[in-house]
Amino acid sequence: MPLNLVKQNIVIYGEQLNPAIYDALWLVGRQIVNERDLVGPRIQTPILSAIKTADLEIVVLPERIQAAPIDPLANDDRASHVIRRTVRELPGTAYRAIGINFQWQLLMEPDSIQEFSRNAFLKSDDPFWREAGAVGGIAGASLTSLALEGRRKIFIDPLIPDYSVTAPPAGFVIDFNYHYDATDGAMVEQALAHRQAAHEETDRLAHLLVR
Amino acid sequence: MIAMHASETQMMYSVDTEIVQLAADCLDPWLSKHYNLRSAPSARLKNDALRDYLKAADWLQSLKSNATPQTGSSTTEPKAESSQARVSAMFVNGVNRLAASGQVQASIVSVYDRIGDLFISGDMKECDRLIRAIDTESTHADLILSFLMATAAAPSDRLPSRAEFFNRVRNRFARELGESKASEILDSLR
């Protein structure tokens, strides 16, 4: 069963983040991105700034800044660098929270999903399953716990095959969200210090699911 | 535990069209109120609420447009294609409504998430249907730009409708902002 990291990003929530200032000139001038990496499309409006560099996508909205590596397998700190530099450059900004997110995808034969989900998330003699899920039921899971000095939420959603598509993907999408309340730049940076550990932890936990 | 997913095949009943219309008139405002996106406490819950709203709205739409019994899984190809196009249109309508209600940010995030998920799953046909479903004359400009940005990485042969979509957007922007400004905004998104 192939298990792959398919998406990762870092999101900070704040107030009045003013997307209009996040143009290429500002990002390069503040050494948030390198000028030579500005090869992709860009959007610059009062409520949306979006820039794709050679290896990152940065989206800024009035209450949200998101940095994501183009290659989800890139295990480096470039997205962290963007967020870290940004909060340092805007010290007076009020933030609310930061999320470090990873999405894994577990693929399997469509026929295997039901049995896998029952074995993974429910007891086989569970009366709930017998009543509600025995016929065609596919279970997922959500788990919230404390981890890496923040709150880790894991959502496991079935990827139900769409038979109108040729060779539809089937399996599970596993979302990991490491949430930290952060009201200022220093707290954002403290949270960012956990990114690498969070990455490794999601790898370990996702593989435990298929063991 | 605990997310239970039964078959997503929609149940379509033969129902009196007047009753369906009555249900639609009553349910549509209820849906908007029930899935109160503004009060969702997190981006994920907002997205979940939007997805549920779109599913419910699509179910309602299917009731309105189906007067004879049928099962979703055994539909013929044209019907399946029509159903898929309707789902695409419902998503576009949903994010448009969200933007029109002042929640432009949430609608932009939904577009990025949706396109990103389609890229990951490789469902470029659905991505192409979404683009075709956008009314470039009435859709919020930031939403249009988000669609262009989110699909910019796709090879043109995988998204055959994108070039035509881009031209429609360009025509609108040129008309509203002038050629020079339209080029400045759009050239990197081609």
Image (cartoon, rainbow, N blue to C red):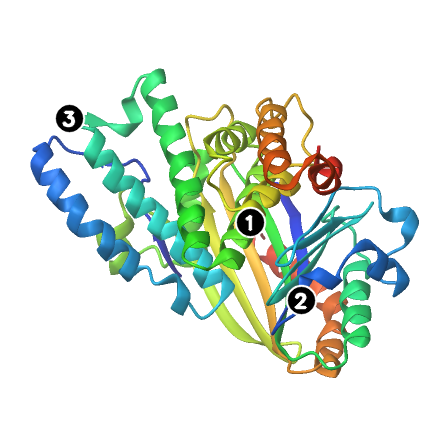
Label annotation for residue B69: 3
Q: Where is residue A114, by image quadrant? A: top left
Can residue B89 be seen by looking at this rendering?
yes
Can residue A130 be seen by looking at this rendering?
no
Tell me whether marks 2 and 3 sit on the same chain: no
Q: Tell us which disc is closer to us: 2 or 3.
A: 2
Q: Residue at the location (47% across, 34% down)?
A: B135
Q: Tell us which disc is closer to us: 3 or 1.
A: 1
Q: Where is residue B183, by image quadrant? A: top right
Tell me whether marks 3 and 1 sit on the same chain: yes
Pinpoint the chain carrying mark 3.
B
Under mark 1, the amino acid is Asp
Does A30 appear above or below B72? below
Label annotation for residue B113: 1
Residue wearing tag 2: A18
Looking at the rendered structure, the secondary structure element under dot 1 is helix
- Kindly report the distance in space between the C-alpha atoms of the residues bearing marks 2 and 3: 52 Å
Where does the image place residue A74, in percent across and percent down from the top left?
78, 51
